[in-house]
Image (cartoon, rainbow, N blue to C red):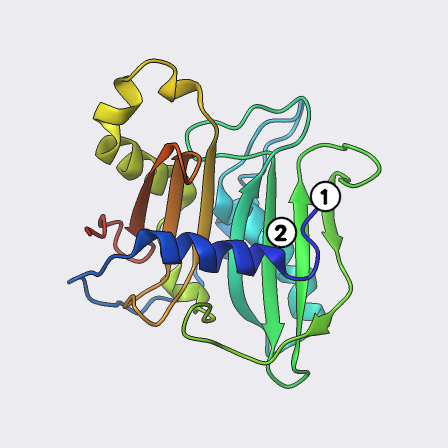
Amino acid sequence: MYNNLSTAVVLAAAIGLAACSSDTTNTTGTKTDAETAAKQVPAGPPQPIAAKAAFWEMYTPAHAWAADLVAISLKSGEVAGVKNADGKAGVWTAVFGSPSQSAARTYVYSVADQLPDITKGVKANLAEAWRGPTAAVMPFQTGDFKIDSEAAYKAAAAKAADWLKEKDNAQKPVSLSLGAASRFPAPVWVILFGTSKLGFLTVVNASTGDIISK
């Protein structure tokens, strides 16, 4: 899966591809929806889940590892037998950092097993050295993560509507990445339909839900 903090690296590349700016302003929130989001994890046959539900499943053990943790990134993934759709995914990978330990740790939440690499539930990788924020990859406050992946996907799909109408485009894979960078006033969702070479990329403010225009 995602080793050596590659989730954060991929996110930095995605944000770089966006090459855009925003006139939206940052807002402040609180972690009031943690328990509600966690309870949204579905029971029964494996189904894809929204980002917040998976995030809070990973946040609890991550906080046990480091009380001063900060969220660095969150990215969707795929697991066999589960179809991602409408902003939901079978696998979510989060990277959390600990300033006091100068370390970061990757957590993976999956709704199903795909052995040997993916196991159902939360899996924590070993901590790795972390030098702290950079302009391209900055931590974000959980209270600023207000827009769930479903809403971000809906906004991005509306923006990409004409592209998605073209032949076969609607069947191409979709990846969602959440993170922050100095160029943005709040954390952002980077939604990529297709690939960076043959696709459509949209950036959504994760605090307001606004599309960030080029």
User: Which of 161/18 is in front?
Assistant: 18
Q: Which residue is mark 1?
A: 121
Q: Amino acid at mark 1?
A: Gly
Q: Which residue is mark 2?
A: 57
**Above or below, comparing residue 12 to residue 160 in the picture:** below
Quarter holding residue 142: bottom left
Q: Which residue occupies the extreme front position in the image? A: 197
**CB within 8 Å, label 2 to label 1:** yes
Picture residue at 55% right of the left edge, 52% below the top: 55
Q: Which mark, residue 109?
A: none
| One can see residue 33 in this view | no
* Nearest to N terminus: mark 2 or mark 1: 2
Picture residue at 63% right of the left edge, 55% below the top: 58
- Number of other residues with Cα within 10 Å of mark 2, as a class: few under 14, some 14 to 19, many 20 or more: many
Q: Secondary structure at mark 2?
A: helix
Q: CA gap, disc 2 to disc 1?
A: 8 Å
Q: Amino acid at mark 2?
A: Glu
Q: Which residue occupies the extreme bottom position in the image? A: 100
Q: Tell me: 11 left or right of 23.
A: right
